[in-house]
Amino acid sequence: METGIITPTIHFKNPRKNLIGVIEGRIKIVTEPTKLQGDKICINSFGFGGANSHILLKSNSKQKINNGTPDDDLPRLVAVSGRTEEAVKTIFNDVQNRLTDAEYISLLHHIHNYNIDGHFYRGYMMMNCKKIKSCSSISKVKHSLHIKRPICFIFSGLGSQWFGMSRDLMKFPVFAKAIKKCDNVLKSYGILITDILTSDNKNICDNIIKLLLGLVGLQIGIIDLLTSINIVPDFIIGHSIGEIVCGYADGCLTAEETILSAYFIGLALYESKICNSSMAEINLEFEKMKNICPSDIDIACYNSSSNFIVSGPTNSVNAFTSKLQV
């Protein structure tokens, strides 16, 4: 149906005498490549076990443009399932041996959008193949039961930043729109998150205001991106500045309130006259920690009943941690 040509039946020479429809010409056996008249064909199947089936197919008249190659350069996520690990890998090999065909990948998405009985192997592939020779991909296959697992969004704090974070995410319209939304809020303060996330300055996050805005803006964009494809969390967890993002994730804060909170926290820290200070992670029970902590060192973060972050003058923190290690 894709070529518009009916393929010939091989090894057919003469019909049996009891095939009246064929002998009278009411049914024609195609023995040569023949042009398909119309856009529909019928297929019959008669099984040895007595199962008979009949299907009517209609061709897709849409013409594929540029072999389905997308206009953008975004990587594609392919998630499939199979009865065996080899079945999943076979699909991945087929996908990888093609140029990126957005329509073919979309077909795979529709096929594997729901659980398929007996498919206990699942896999995903992240690929970008506009040219086969420059094709790059990441894939993983795992045995999995049909269990819907809870989804948890974990929002990080200081220390998770890295140069160039989210540059590729800016290619997604939903993510870029979220960052633009934050930019509009911050414009009157003379700072743009777009500039922070796309800057060529590797030291841009040395500025505490830009660091906090970059981390919070990035996570706002990720929330909007994930929820736009119906990935909604069952649980949310935030650490440090990530706790503010939790407020946005569960609807307590608007994007404007969230990004302004990050800005003014950063501004307060930037304008504070803080001495040369350090932080350290301590694993001790609270009561013991409270009794031995020096007066110039504060417990800054209560991670758990036996894990804390302390902060204070660098010399005092170094002396305190050295004493604990003895």
Image: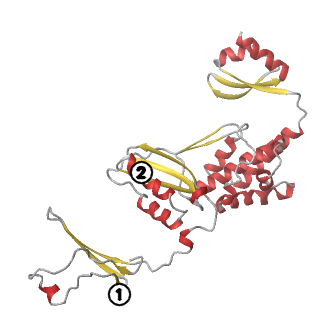
Residue 143: image location, x then y, percent: 40, 42
Q: Nearer the viewer, residue 168 or 145?
A: 168
Is residue 119 toward the left or the right of residue 135 in the image? left
Q: Residue at x 68, y 25 (%)?
A: 308
Report if residue 293 is visible in the image: no
Q: Earlier in the sequence, mark 2 or mark 1?
A: 1
Dot 1, crowdedness within 10 Å: few (<14), some or many (≥20)?
Answer: few
Measure the C-alpha gap from mark 2 to mark 1: 37 Å
Residue 166: image location, x then y, percent: 70, 51
Q: Residue at x 55, y 62 (%)?
A: 100
Residue 306, picture quadrant: top right
Mark drawn on residue 88: 2
Q: Nearer the viewer, residue 279 or 35?
A: 35
Specify the amino acid type for callout 1: Gln
Dot 2, crowdedness within 10 Å: few (<14), some or many (≥20)?
Answer: many
Residue 27: image location, x then y, percent: 20, 85
Residue 238, picture quadrant: top right
Q: Residue at x 77, y 53 (%)?
A: 198
Q: Residue at x 53, y 57 (%)?
A: 230
**Secondary structure at numbered mark 1:** loop
Is residue 257 toward the left or the right of residue 189 in the image? left
* Residue 49, placed above or below residue 299: below
Specify the amino acid type for callout 2: Val
| Residue at the extreme left of the image, as rendered | 18
Mark drawn on residue 37: 1
Report if residue 111 is visible in the image: yes
